[in-house]
Image (cartoon, rainbow, N blue to C red):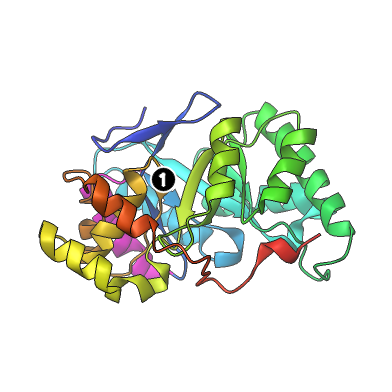
Amino acid sequence: MMSSSLPSFRLNTGAQMPLLGLGTYRLQGKQMHRSVDAALGEGYRAFDTAAVYGNEADLGHALLDLMPKHNLTRADIFLISKLSPADMGPKAREGCARSLERLGLGGYIDLYLIHWPGTEGLEPEDERNAQHRAHSWTVFEELHANGMLRAIGVSNYSPRHLIELLETCRVRPAVLQVEFHPRLAQRELRGICRDSGVCFQAYSSLGKGALLSEPEVVAMAKGHGRTASQVLLRWATQQGVAVLPRSARPERVRENGQVFDFDLDEGGMERLSDMDSGTRFCKRDPTSVV
């Protein structure tokens, strides 16, 4: 059972997933160790990695080393990883096995996601992309049934991809993880998730840093005596959206964890939501994938 005072979201599996997690994209070695140490000290219990990040082993080693320091066990940690697009379809089972081996944390992963709706090496319009998604999900369902993947979900799915999955799956996805911030409010996807009992989880909540200098965000941060990143993260979490901020600087990791002791007023929430322009800071667009 996770030991943290930070809020959590109840997944459709019945498990509790922390609303705040540490993103680990590009974190390696000592840098990973420092960020994980700061995160655990601040109360983070969820950690997000992926096969394509090349750091699943780094995260696993850091957690194994640091859990005793923070009086934690594997049961206190919520671990998220993702299947590589190179392993979609026929290679899905082997890809999952490699993630489990590299992480080395108890023989299970709390949440495992299909990282991208397409397959590496296939053109976006190739119809085999849909076949590989379906095959991969069947493998996920089997590994979920035997307890190796405690919850399963998808990342970067468009509304069409998500509806396709919901209409054909035996086990519904527990989580959809996508880019989400005031410039990309993802209203259609959020509506599908809400109606289907799927947790909506955000990455790139700060717009890869571009939103930290937005005048509306800066003014709101000043008015609350907070940082711009805290305002952006609070805008999301106040709507019940799970977030995964990433930083290689321990002080920023701690700062990003301090977003549950203040609220934005209704007007402030609306002003940030009105910034929506459909802008993606992560340049790959999944809507083109068949």
Residue 37 part of the magenta-drawn span: yes
Asked which secondary structure carries label 1, the reply is strand
218 vs 17, left or right, is left
Vertical arrangement, residue 236 with respect to residue 207, above or below:
above
Residue 36 seen: no
- Could you tell me residue 136's position as x and y percent? 77, 46
Where is the C terminus found, in terms of image quarters?
bottom right
Q: Residues within 10 Å of mark 1 (few under 14, many from 20)?
A: many
Magenta span dominant secondary structure: helix
- Observer able to see residue 15: yes
- In the image: residue 144, left or right of residue 257: right
If the image is split into quadrants, where does the N terminus sit? top left
Q: Which residues are magenta?
A: 27-45
Query: Which residue sits at x=42%, y=68%?
Result: 207
Q: Nearer the viewer, residue 54 or 164?
A: 164
Q: Residue at x 63, y 37 (%)?
A: 173
- Give the residue at mark 1: 242
Picture layout, residue 122 above or below residue 239: below
Q: Residue furthest top?
A: 14
How many labels sit on residues?
1
Residue 241 coordinates in the image, percent (x, y)? 41, 44
- Name the residue rendered at 27%, 38% in the picture: 6
Residue 264, position in %: x, y?
A: 22, 49
Q: Quadrant of residue 208?
A: bottom left
Q: Image quadrant of residue 68?
A: top left
In this picture, residue 83 sits left or right of residue 126: left
The residue nearer to you, when weighing 80 against 99, is: 80
Tell me the residue at 39%/45% (across/down).
Answer: 46
Q: Nearer the viewer, residue 133 or 70?
A: 133
Q: Please check the rendered image and state whether residue 119 is part of the magenta-colored stretch, yes or no.
A: no
